[in-house]
Image (spheres, helix red, strand yellow):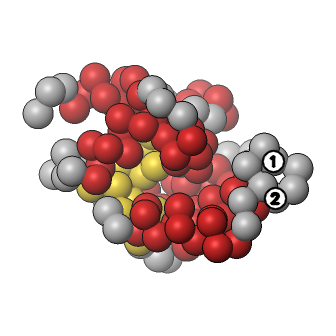
Amino acid sequence: MVIAVLDTNVLISGTFWLGPPKEVLHRAKVGFFQAVVSPALLAELHDVLTRKDKPFCLSTTEAKRVEMDLLSYAQVVRPKAHVAVCRDSADNRVLECALEAGANFVITGDPDLLEIGHYRGIKIVKVRAFLDSLGSR
């Protein structure tokens, strides 16, 4: 089974808008692949959903609903290893999650992660490239 880490930008886009990120979330929900997150990525998601300087401004209760939906199909891993390959420490948390999960992919729209391209055998791809790799299974 394909294992993929869903970066926060993909989760946000798939939650609020139609398009390829929503398709990725749907495919995870129906078992086309195993989605993976970590406590650090869940905390980042909660922060983005509830911060006043972001367009979502959800209440804590509303944000918890989004998180619970995610947890209904995503596996949570607790990374033991720490990496420091990205200038943004939040990006390092994504790679740590992927390593712990034995992920095949990191799905992201983050240019800094995309620039890396791959890390220790993990492909770092945009949403469309990931969907293309899944095909019509």
Can residue 78 be seen here? The reply is yes
Residue toward you, 121 or 57:
57
Q: Position of residue 108 (x, y in %)?
A: 52, 38
Q: Which residue bears the numbered disc 2?
A: 51
Determine the image quadrant of residue 123. Answer: top left
Q: Residue at x 43, y 63 (%)?
A: 69
**Helix, strand or loop status at disc 1:** loop
Q: Residue at x 43, y 61 (%)?
A: 70
- Graded by Cα atoms within 10 Å as few (under 14), some (14 to 19) or many (20 or more), the crowding at tag 2 reads some
Q: Amino acid at mark 1?
A: Lys
Q: Amino acid at mark 2?
A: Arg
Residue toward you, 77 or 42:
42
**Helix, strand or loop status at disc 2:** loop
Placement of 75 over or under 135, stated as above or below: below
- Graded by Cα atoms within 10 Å as few (under 14), some (14 to 19) or many (20 or more), the crowding at tag 1 reads few
Q: Which residue bears the numbered disc 1?
A: 54
Tell me, yes or no, whether the two marked residues, 2 and 1, touch with CB atoms within 8 Å.
Answer: yes
Can residue 125 be seen here? The reply is no
Placement of 102 over or under 128, stated as above or below: below
Say which quadrant the C terminus sits in. top left
